[in-house]
Amino acid sequence: MEFQAVIMAAGGGSRMMDLTASIPKALLPVANKHLIWYPLNLLERVGFEEAIVITTKDVQKILSQETRMKLDIVCIPDDADMGTADALRHIHQKIKTDVLVMSCDLITDVALHEVVDLFRAHDATLSMLMRKAQDLTEPVPGQKGKTKPTEQRDFIGVDNTGKRLLFMANEADLEDDLIIRKSVMQKHPQMHIKTGLVDAHLYCLKKYVVDFLADNKSITSIRGELVPYLVRKQFSSFTSSKQKVEEMDHDPKKKAQQSLDIYSLLKDDELTELARDKSCWNDHRGDMEEAYHGAKLRCYAHIMNEGMCYRVNNLALYIEANRQVPKMLPIFGIDDLLIHASAQITDKSLVGTDSMIDAFTQIGERTSIKHSIIGTSCNISEKVKITNSIIMNGVTIEDGCSIQGCVICSNAVVAKGADVKDCLIGSGITIEAKSKRLNEVIVGSDQLMEI
């Protein structure tokens, strides 16, 4: 087995708590499939037969229904404060090979071999998937007229091929200047700095990186700490790192105080080094330097310019994914009809060709549904108009209601004649009859919250 696949599914969805307060992020419905179904489906489509899933007990209950793969499920307590690197460290004993790590909120049609082949071709320490940042123009429920929070940009430096990662820094960590180390510029005098890229949270990592994490508990996040560390470490002196390790071996006190250096875990055999030396064309041209300029650690990125690649980690991206995924179901190997066979729809109802209706849902007479997704076991009465909305499971919408541009969570009730536009309605909430609600987030005891 070349890779072990690991899916991170223990996150609480802190950037969209109005959705995840009553349902784990991994179980949020996207095109009437649980969010975690999409990374599992990706692995299954490319031939993986087993995977490790790090999750909570609530998610564990449904995982056997999501895939034919053999799953090794590792449950983390709900109150455990673990970052992604902490979670990978938690399963250190299970890791026997290089790993493919991905987040449960990734929906993509990427050709996965593009990322894996970079890892193989360059015997890389890390290869990762990145995508171009997307401009989302559709309104988000409850946010109309409000100032959007400013996203902190990543500054990503790549070589002339656009694949070798040379520099990485987040805008929040910078002061006035962008400082690039001299050792980087000496080896790569031409560097392209990009600010419009987003980390998709899909990584190929060498096993020794997981071994390194096991000893370095100060690193808690893969994206925020481990990846920038590996990118920087490419241009550290291997000799000086080796000297530090030797000093630590001779001084037990220093060894106890100092974390393990990742260079001490590199174990290249002579045949591997010879192959690398003979394939320097695989790395660079224009000088007589050795392959990879002698770098023992190498980081690469596959930048996805076309196709679907969403990290569903906020409300805007959740809505966008629900709008786009139904158009691309065949890519995910889904042959199901947009309208489930068990759904009951009267002859006088109108359901648009781009809408989805799931199992056991009932649609009353003279009801119109356009550009919307309706979940399981919903009861939608007569003369209802639903447009550009996401209706989760078990929702009741009574006669004469108008729903436009809304997200309505499970088991909510919209009473007779209500007019609801651009709102997020929380799980179990009841909207009063004939009320008008506009651009609100309605959760808890009709409590309004900022998203």
Image: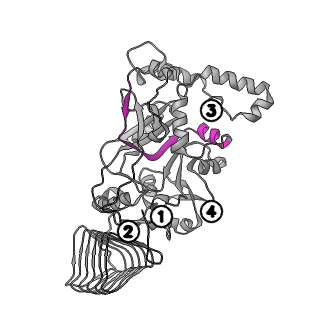
Q: Amino acid at mark 3?
A: Ile
Which label sits on residue 32?
A: 2
424 to 124, vertically: above or below: below
Nearest the eye: 35 or 340: 35
- Label 2: how many Cα within 10 Å (few below 14, some 14–19, many 20+): many
Q: Which residue in the protein does label 4 denote?
A: 79
- In x, y percent, where is residue 203? 49, 43
In the shown orientation, is residue 212 left or right of residue 164?
right
Which of the two labelled residues, at mark 4 and mark 1, occupies the earlier sequence position?
Answer: 1
As measured in the structure, the alpha-carbon distance from the residue carrying label 1 to the one carrying label 3 is 37 Å
Which of the two labelled residues, at mark 1 and mark 3, occupies the earlier sequence position?
Answer: 1
Secondary element at tag 4? loop
- Label 1: how many Cα within 10 Å (few below 14, some 14–19, many 20+): some
What range is drawn magenta here?
Answer: 190-214
- Of badges 2 and 1, the one in the foreground is 1
Q: Which residue in the protein does label 3 denote?
A: 262
Is residue 166 on the magenta stretch? Answer: no
Which of the two labelled residues, at mark 2 and mark 4, occupies the earlier sequence position?
Answer: 2
Q: Residue drawn at (31%, 87%), measured in percent from left and top?
A: 416
Secondary element at tag 2? loop
As measured in the structure, the alpha-carbon distance from the residue carrying label 2 to the one carrying label 1 is 20 Å
